[in-house]
């Protein structure tokens, strides 16, 4: 089973609309490489302009969060209905910064995954261990619990189409990336968890990215690992030439 590599930029809370549009003008036609999927996950305010700019290109646009209800009295929240209405394709769910600073739990992550799928958005579900958990040797246990919780209630066909991003928290924004061998070991294990929960075909189909201090200089090394299907990139996705190099490096 061949899986299409996927590079996703997570801009976090960066870029105004005009900055987003000039970034897009600079990467258009360049961060579009045959055989690699290219995704920009931007702040909500930039999404309409980016969806418009992305028309006729192969670059997909994603959000960084959604609420699990379709609508209601949830001040400040954005739903899957609204994202679908905008023409967004992907949505990040359960990023560690949302788990850490905005009280997301395995349960809300699961509800959000269901909401995304209900509205034909592709969830990029983030999992990963804290430094203390890595040091205590519980990385795989933590990733197993998070994966099982996130996928609860999904069918095999639904799981085959989602993306999982393994991001060890200690490697995010620190410049301390996981070695490609370590990332491969954990991602291979997560794939085996999917195989246990579903079947081998589903495990072979689901795409699993690595994230945490990925840069143009190390992306190819990660991509050379059998189970790593792409990268979720923060800092190095903000500058056009760096983003283009990441997509090229994933070929
Ligand atoms: P950095 O690439 O800046 O380490 O961020 C990783 C990340 O959190 C992507 O979601």
Image (cartoon, helix red, strand yellow):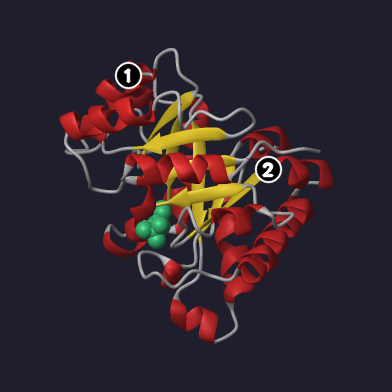
Determine whether 181 is above or below 241 in the image. below
Determine whether 13 is above or below 45 in the image. below
Determine whether 36 is above or below 144 in the image. above
Disc 1 + disc 2, Cβ < 8 Å:
no
Foreground pick, 217 / 116: 217
Mark seen at residue 53 = 1
Residue 36 occupies which quadrant of the picture? top right
Image location (x, y in percent) of residue 223: 64, 52
Left or right position of 48 against 154: left
Residue in view at x 81 percent, y 38 percent? 1
Q: Secondary structure at mark 1?
A: helix
Residue corresponding to mark 2: 206
Residue in view at x 54 percent, y 70 percent? 178
Left or right position of 148 against 121: right
Residue 248 occupies which quadrant of the picture? top right
Foreground pick, 173 / 128: 173
Image location (x, y in percent) of residue 174: 36, 70
Image location (x, y in percent) of residue 10: 37, 46
Residue in view at x 70 percent, y 33 percent? 157
Q: Residues within 10 Å of mark 2 (few under 14, many from 20)?
A: many
Left or right position of 44 against 240: left
Image location (x, y in percent) of residue 184: 67, 63
On whether ligand 1 comes within 8 Å of the CB at mark 1, the answer is: no
Q: Secondary structure at mark 2?
A: loop
Where's the C terminus, which quadrant?
top right
């Amino acid at each position: 089973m061949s899986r299409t590599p996927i590079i996703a930029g997570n801009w976090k809370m960066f870029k105004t609309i005009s900055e987003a549009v000039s970034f897009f003008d600079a990467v258009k036609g360049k961060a579009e490489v045959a055989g690699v999927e290219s995704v920009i996950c931007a702040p909500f305010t930039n999404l309409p302009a980016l969806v418009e700019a992305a028309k006729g290109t192969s670059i997909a646009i994603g959000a960084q969060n959604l609420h699990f209800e379709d609508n209601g009295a949830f001040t400040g929240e954005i739903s899957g209905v609204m994202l679908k209405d905008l023409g967004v394709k992907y949505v990040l769910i359960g990023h560690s910064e949302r788990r850490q600073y905005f009280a997301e739990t395995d349960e809300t992550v699961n509800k959000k995954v269901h909401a995304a799928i209900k509205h034909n958005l592709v969830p990029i579900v983030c999992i990963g261990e804290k430094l203390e958990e890595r040091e205590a040797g519980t990385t795989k246990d933590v990733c197993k619990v998070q994966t099982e919780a996130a996928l609860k209630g999904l069918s095999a066909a639904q799981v085959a189409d989602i993306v999982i991003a393994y991001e060890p928290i200690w490697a995010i924004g620190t410049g301390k990336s996981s070695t490609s061998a370590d990332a491969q070991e954990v991602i291979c294990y997560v794939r085996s968890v999917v195989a246990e929960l579903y079947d081998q075909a589903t495990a072979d189909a689901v795409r699993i990215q690595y994230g945490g201090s990925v840069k143009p200089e190390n992306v190819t090394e990660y991509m050379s690992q059998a189970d790593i299907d792409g990268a979720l990139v923060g800092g190095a996705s903000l500058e056009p030439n760096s983003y283009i190099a990441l997509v090229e490096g994933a070929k």
